[in-house]
Amino acid sequence: MSEQEKPEIGSITWIDLTVPNAKEVKDFYSKVVGWKSNPVSMGHYNDFSMIAPESGKVASGICHTKGVNAKLPPQWLVYITVANVDESAKICKNNGGEIIVKAKNMGNYGRYCVIKDPAGAVCALFQPL
């Protein structure tokens, strides 16, 4: 990712949905929203990239509650870009938040963690490479 392509700190970079029945739910959103889907191999199963019908751009992901997503609640999860995931996770914890998924690498994209704020709302923090 070039310097020009890096998302702005504080911006919502990505959104996905993690549910036990991702295949059925991706079909639901394909019908309701018009998204097309592309399978994303997770080894023994597929998650899905959801594609906007007019632009052909990836709009979101729909994932199974398995593997790296096993601890995630069934909800749309926004990924908010931060300068340093590890530091933001520490600040979260020191300010009454909870770490649901510890900071880890996301392939060649960067690092992320999943947090719960003091009100109980869940989001992911993302640090691009």
Image: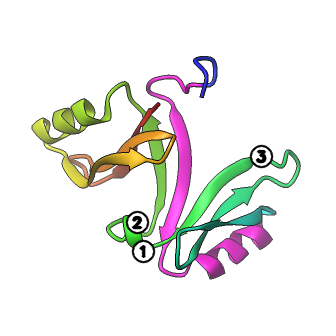
- Can you see residue 73? no
- Residue visible at 46% across and 43% down in the picture: 79
| Residue 21 at x, y percent in the picture | 54, 81
Q: Is residue 124 above or below residue 64?
A: above
9 up-or-down from 93: above or below? above
Q: Residue 11 magenta-drawn? A: yes
**Residue 75 visible somewhere in the drawing:** yes
What's the amino acid at mark 2?
A: Asn
Q: Which residues are magenta?
A: 6-32
Please, is residue 94 above or below residue 57 in the view? Answer: above
Report the quarter where the N terminus lies: top right
Tell me the CA gap for discs 1 and 3: 25 Å
Query: Label 2 neighbourhood size at 10 Å, few (<14), some (14-19), many (20+)?
Result: some
The residue carrying mark 2 is 69
N-term-proximal mark, 3 vs 2: 3
Classify mark 1: helix, strand or loop: loop
Q: Is residue 124 left or right of residue 38?
A: left
